[in-house]
Image (spheres, grey):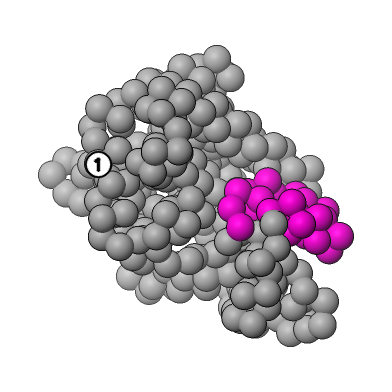
Amino acid sequence: MKESYPLLVITGPTASGKTSIAAHLADRLNGEIISADSRQVYRGMNLGTGKDLEEYELHGRQIPYHLIDILDAGEVYNVFEFQKDAFRCLDEIRSRGKNSILCGGTGMYIDAILNSYHFIQVPANQERRQELEQWSDQELIALLKSLRKLHNSTDTDSKKRLIRAIEIEEYSRIHNQVVTAYPSVKSLVIGIDISREERRRRISQRLEQRLKQGMVDEVKILLDSGISPEALLFYGLEYKYLTLYLLGTISYDEMKSQLEIAIHQFAKRQMTWFRKMEKEGTHIHWMDGMLPLEAKIVKIQQLLAESGLELRDM
């Protein structure tokens, strides 16, 4: 077993300001950022995923980041692939004598790194997929419920997600192979906490801003490039509702209203996942997201000094 990786984690719900904090910390700590966001891996999906790439540019230099823009939109990425890629990044960053900062709001991805999950690698079963395509969504949901408890509501967001979730459960019942264990991680986990009211305000403001910046056009370009509506529906949230609008299924006002509600619900699910992580033993140091940026940076540096986390010399 390799020595454990020292890792600083910056997490929190959507619109909490994680990226800016992580970038400033990377600037001061000789660090590089590994994105823990399940949708920022896709090229061409910028506004909808909130990449905010300009925040990685500080003092005239680019803060190195990883696992952003690594796949074409329309491809499928999952926690198994993320874990493999993230540990590869940790190796590479350490080989350069730099410090790793994991930043994002996809709780399952973060959990997979902190606890070095063992995953069964499930291959595609095209024959079974074609069979399940004939089933209704309700029939698929009933089948999935018979296989396991529904922990993640995103599994029911689209038929594609439902079929993949069933495929994984059915495969895992007859196979018990696991991937090689990854090294352990010694971490300091910082959660950026904002009140529900402030979170709702930021989400609404950000949605308005991104629509003005051309988020509808972003999705239209993806559709025009040949990516199927089903593929975009699979990604959920912005891509689901904007696709439905562009297909004429819902009006612009309906799209905006339903999307805003869905993002609020998503943020609530993120917080539920973080609470689950805490119950299962992950210590998250929650920090007031309303503090000035410099105060947050100083506080995190103090926590780092107290934690005994052995970062590389700055």
Task: Determine the residue located farthest toward the right in the rendered image.
Answer: 146
The residue at the point 57 percent across, 56 percent down is 109
Q: Residue at x 74, y 51 (%)?
A: 138
Report crowding for label 1: few under 14, some 14 to 19, many 20 or more residues within 10 A (C-alpha).
few
Q: Which residues are magenta?
A: 137-159
- Up-down relation of residue 109 to residue 273 (above or below): below
- Residue occupying image coordinates x 24% and y 36%: 214
Residue furthest toward the left? 60
Q: Quadrant of residue 248?
A: top left
> With 106 as the anchor, is 297 left or right in this view?
left
Q: Give the answer, above or below, for where 173 lies relative to 245.
A: below
Q: Is residue 221 magenta?
A: no
Q: Amino acid at mark 1?
A: Asp
Instruction: Examine the structure image and report whether residue 147 is included in the region drawn in magenta.
Output: yes
Residue 24 is left or right of residue 193, and the answer is left
Q: Main secondary structure of the magenta part?
A: helix
Residue 234 placed where, x, y %?
A: 51, 54
Q: Provide the secondary structure element on which disc 1 rests.
A: helix
Q: Which x, y percent locates residue 49?
A: 39, 44
Q: Nearer the viewer, residue 251 or 150?
A: 251
Q: Quadrant of residue 278?
A: top right
Q: Is residue 264 above or below residue 237?
A: above
Between 303 and 296, the one nearer to me in the picture:
296
Measuring from the top left, give residue 124's x and y in whole percent. 59, 79
**Image quadrant in which you'd find residue 197:** top right
x, y percent for residue 62: 21, 51
User: Which quarter of the rendered picture does the N terminus lie within?
Assistant: bottom right
Residue at the spot of label 1: 217
